[in-house]
Image: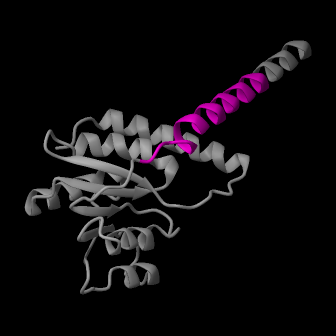
Amino acid sequence: MRRRQRHLVYTSMAALVMLLFLNGASGTVLFARAKADPLKSADAIVVLGGEHDGREAYGLSLAERGYAPAVLLSNPYSTRDKVMQKACAPRTDIEVICVPPVPGTTRGEAIFTRKLADERGWQSVIVVSWRYHLPRARRIFDECFVTPGRSVIMRDVPRRYPFSVAQWQYTYLYQYGGWVKAEIQGPCS
C-alpha cells in the first residue's frame, strides 16, 4: 500500500513539474517574447488598464511625438488615484479621454474603443499594454474592434519585468486563462 502511495506522489510531482515546464517554455515564447508592431500614425492611442508601470506616460508621449491626436486612457481605478488624476487632466496639445471600461476587462476596453471609433470615425488605433498581454489583447481587439476598414497597432510599455519564476508561471497561466475566456465569450456584441 505504501509503495503505491509513493508511486502516486512521485507520478503527481512529475506531472506537476512537466506542466510547469511546459507553461514556462510556451509562455516565454508566446507571451514574454511577443512582438510589438512598428509604430505608425493612428487616429488614437488606447492605453489599457493595468499597473501604473509608465503606460499612461508612454501613451501620452506617443501623442506628444505626433503618432495620434487623441489618447484614450482606460480608467478602472479609484477617483482618488493620483496617477490617473494627472494623466486625465485636460491638455491643450492633445485630447485626453478617460473612460472606465464596462466590463472592467480588455474586452470592455475594446468595446469602448469601438464605440468611440464609430462616433469619431477612427480607422486605426495604437494599443498600449504589457508585452506579455499583447497576444491576448490583439485577439480581443481583432474580435471587437478590427473591421475591413479598421486596424490596430499593438505596442508594449517599454520596460523590463523583473519577475521571479513563480511570478512568470502565474502570469502565463493568467494569460492562458484569459485567452480561453475570450474564446468562450466569442464575438463582441
State left or right for residue 91 relative to residue 132.
left
Task: Name the residue located 72 percent from the left edge and 52 percent from the top edge.
Answer: 164
Could you say which is closer to the camera, residue 156 or residue 19? 156
> Quadrant of the rendered structure where residue 98 is?
bottom left
Image quarter for residue 48?
A: bottom left
The image shows residue 71 at horizontal and vertical percentages of 29, 69
Q: Position of residue 170 (x, y in %)?
A: 61, 46
Q: Which residues are magenta?
A: 12-36
Q: Position of residue 4 (x, y in %)?
A: 85, 13
Instruction: Give the side of residue 154 with respect to residue 33, left or right.
Output: left
User: Which is nearer the eye, 79 or 153?
Assistant: 153
Q: Which quadrant does the C terminus fall into?
A: top left
Determine the residue positioned at 9% across, 58% down.
121
Q: Position of residue 40 (x, y in %)?
A: 31, 55
Majority SS type along the magenta span: helix
Looking at the image, residue 2 lies above or below residue 131: above
Q: Nearer the viewer, residue 141 or 175?
A: 141
Q: How many marks?
A: 0
In the rendered view of the protein, which quadrant contains the N terminus? top right
**Is residue 23 in the magenta section?**
yes
Q: Residue at x 45, y 80 (%)?
A: 83
Examine the rendered structure and indicate whether residue 56 appears above or below residue 132. Answer: below
